[in-house]
Image (tube, rainbow, N blue to C red):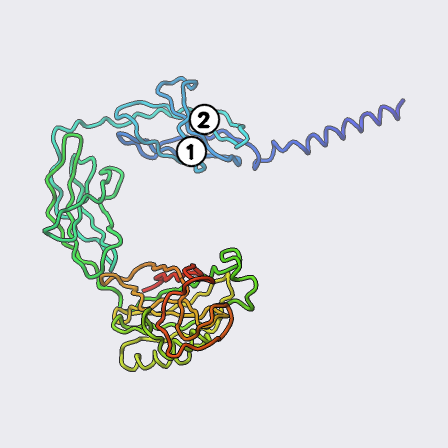
Amino acid sequence: MRRLLTGLLMTALTAVFITACDDDSGDPQHTLQTPTNLRTNTVDRTMVGLAWDGGGDPDFYEILRAENDDPNSAEVVTQVQATSFTDSGLEPGTTYWYYVVSGFVNGEKSDMSTALQVTTKVGVVKQKAPEAPAMPTMRAQTDRTIEIEWAQVADADFYRVYMSGSANAQFEKVAELDAINDPQMWSAQGLKSDRAYYFYVVAANGVGASQPSPTLQAQTQTASMSVTYRLVIDAVWSEETHPGTFAHVVDPHFSDLGGIIHSPDVSFWTPGQVASPGMAQMAVFGAVEILGEEAQAKIDQNLALTFIEDTRQIRPPGQLEVTFNATPQFSAVTFVSMIGPSPDWFIGCSGLSLMEDGTWQDEVKIDLISYDGGVRTNNVLEMLGPENDPPEPIKFKEGFPLGGDIVGSFTFTRIAQ
């Protein structure tokens, strides 16, 4: 009997121990604690800023608001993860009661915090429209942006910003800002370099709008003398995108890359014209040595900035990245690469401008469609083939295979200036 009682006692103690180990309610990282010290950090006519002390490790805090002192009438405003929240859109001169609870995503929630009673400030009834703002001032500018600011206007509820590219042109409203919660400033983006722009500001409230402020003339900076671009070559030519033109090709690739940063006044190849010796070598053999010599001749004449040769062949699908510098004088780019293996087909761009109206473009992207170099006559994805005598002009590749198909893309992105 003593052994039986001892066994039963040990079993009961073990069960209690296991139950205690499984119960993690004592772990402060897995418990919900009622938020404390609910308080305001700002009170205005239409908003109340709240803060509180949390505890435990809740997934969220739930903010509740009531319009009387009965907690059962409180309704959920929102859920946040921070221990602060600003409730906006309230009525001026109105009393509200706030509560906060902590919760888990599984639906478990703590008790409500102690109620916080808050009365918003009394709204001022406007009797007239605000006065016109003083002339705005230029806060900062680059070759693409102008930031303006202006002094606060009494009785204003919001501001309207107007902009024009000419003092005599029509102004357009470009922004409307809250006079209480937004700063008295605005930034115009995507502007042209070395250009004058014109701004004025109007203050308004529920009664009406002011007269326009005096007009500010501000000028963007001149485009940087040197910028850095990244070129990403994305080769998408594959059996998935071009069934029947890829699977049986021996070593499909884009060959050595040749690139020239040059003046918009010169061209190294043009559809409809016969390929130069450098372009012919690139189109047939995938080499760019002669093209580099042609580029150097233009560099010596101060018509080109630099020549780029990259021997890292791309085996599609794949990518290649190169970086280079450009200047306003040398803002055009020419890049070419042979489609290998092929008789004389290639991809590329010719004299592509990275500036628009004197402003560097943030990104330029073009699709790559196969060109026929006009040097060989074969129409198969193999090297060489009969020569054209005389050579034919460069043209878009026509017909099967690859005729009119997109085989990749060039993306030029400005990364520094």
The answer to whether 292 is drawn above or below residue 192 in the figure is below
Kindly state the secondary structure of the residue where label 2 is placed: loop
Q: CA distance from mark 1 to mark 2?
A: 9 Å
| Relative depth, front residue between 277 and 37 | 277
Other-residue count near label 2 (Cα within 10 Å), few / some / many at <14 / 14–19 / ≥20: many
For the point 27% across and 63% down, which residue is it?
Answer: 355
* Residue 29 drawn at (x, y percent): 56, 37
| Relative depth, front residue between 374 and 55 | 374
Q: Earlier in the sequence, mark 1 or mark 2?
A: 1
Q: Which residue is mark 1?
A: 52
| Relative depth, front residue between 395 and 294 | 395
Three-letter amino acid code at the position of disc 2:
Ser
Q: Quadrant of residue 2?
A: top right
* Residue 310 drawn at (x, y percent): 44, 73
| Relative depth, front residue between 415 and 297 | 297
Other-residue count near label 1 (Cα within 10 Å), few / some / many at <14 / 14–19 / ≥20: some
